[in-house]
Amino acid sequence: MNDETLSPQDIAKRAAGVAAIDCYVRTGMKLGLGSGSTSHWMVRTLGERVRAGLDVVGVPTSTGTAEVALEAGVPLGDLDDLGELDLTLDGADEIDRQLRMIKGGGACLLWEKIVATASKRMVALVDDKKVVEGLGAFPLPVEVVRFGWTATRRLMERLLAAHGLERAEVVIRGGPTTPLLTDSGNVILDCRLGAIADPDGLMVGLNGIPGVVENGLFCGVADKALVGYPDGTARELG
């Protein structure tokens, strides 16, 4: 695809993915392949490198990423068979300067966190619009089991209030009658918070609620972050 047909944000996303492959990917690696538009740019570039002789195997974090990888010609493996991965490359919906992230806008947060934490290193790939001073403007996704989701929501609202987020709005993605289902068959509750004062504490607290499978706060997960810019350059965050 020619640059003339790409938006400035797409150019930035592609730049982050290309830089990550150039900086961190080596032949023989076992890679976690992230989900979302920035990650898919990376996967397509990875396919070009595979066709040029790069020998890697990938573990996708969603069925959507698996489809992109297969189309691009990236060999895929099973996480249970491969064991610990060398590196995961994945995007974020928001990232602060401590490399804490909100992820899950594409409803893939559970698989993303499993793959990222099964890796020796995780590098976040973002365009410059995703870098924030504080997390929370992007709604925080929480993956919950479908059974009793309204009871789970009540407990979540109490926890959010205890974190000073009394005005938080928690809605089921897709609506109660036609909820979006994740690749694991769960539903997503999006928490419109505005600002999160204690992302680390909230991450732990949410996962202690019965019915919560995983939440979209990724604190202490990313080792590095590459930020892409509309001029086609990329730089490490920090």
Image (spheres, rainbow, N blue to C red):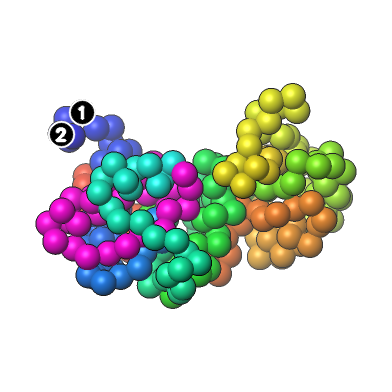
Q: What kind of element bears circle 1?
A: helix
Q: Amino acid at mark 1?
A: Thr
Residues in magenta, as a range: 34-63
For mark 2, what is the residue? Answer: 2
Circles 1, 2 touching at the beta carbon (< 8 Å): yes
Which circle marks residue 93 in the picture? none
- Looking at the figure, which quarter contains the N terminus? top left
Q: What kind of element bears circle 2?
A: loop
Q: Crowding near pointer 2: few (<14 within 10 Å), some, many (20+)?
A: few
Residue at 38%, 72% in the rendered image: 86
For mark 1, what is the residue? Answer: 5
Farthest top residue? 177
Q: Amino acid at mark 2?
A: Asn
Residue at 79%, 51% in the rendered image: 211
Farthest front residue? 81
Q: Is residue 72 visible?
A: yes
Closer to us: 165 or 83: 83
Verify whether residue 50 appears in magenta: yes
Closer to us: 86 or 83: 83
Q: Position of residue 73 (x, y in %)?
A: 25, 49
Q: Crowding near pointer 1: few (<14 within 10 Å), some, many (20+)?
A: few
Closer to us: 129 or 72: 72
